[in-house]
Image (tube, rainbow, N blue to C red):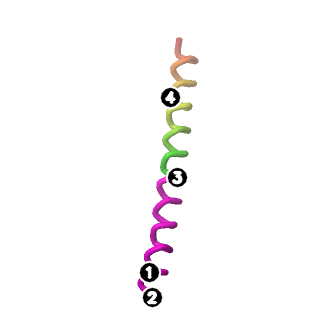
């Protein structure tokens, strides 16, 4: 039983990390877009 709770805990952490990664990617894209607009 302990293994299952550890696994679900791990899965939650992985999902959170993926979410943070996506957020960072969105911010990076936005920054690049803003920079490109300023450069024009």
Residue 1: give its label: 2
Foreground: disc 1 or disc 4: 1
**Who is closer to the viewer here, 24 or 4?**
4
Residue drawn at x 58%, y 18% as measured from the top left: 38
Residue where numbered disc 1 is placed: 4
- At which x and y percent is residue 21? 48, 50
Q: Does the magenta stretch include residue 7?
A: yes
Q: Which of marks 3 and 1 is nearer the N terminus?
A: 1
Residue where numbered disc 4 is placed: 32
Region rendered in magenta: 1-20
Q: What element carries label 4?
A: helix
- At which x and y percent is residue 4? 44, 80
Residue where numbered disc 3 is placed: 19
- Mark 2 and 1 residues: CB-CB less than 8 Å, in contact? yes
- Mark 3 and 1 residues: CB-CB less than 8 Å, in contact? no
- At which x and y percent is residue 31? 55, 32
Q: Earlier in the sequence, mark 1 or mark 4?
A: 1
Q: Earlier in the sequence, mark 4 or mark 3?
A: 3
Q: Distance between the residues labelled 4 and 2?
A: 47 Å
Q: Does the magenta stretch include residue 13?
A: yes
Residue 25: give its label: none
Q: Which residue lies furthest to the front in this view?
A: 1
Above or below: residue 15 compared with residue 38: below
């Amino acid at each position: 039983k302990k293994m299952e709770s550890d696994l679900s805990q791990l899965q939650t952490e992985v999902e959170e990390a993926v979410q943070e990664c996506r957020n960072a990617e969105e911010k990076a894209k936005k920054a690049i877009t803003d920079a490109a607009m300023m450069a024009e």
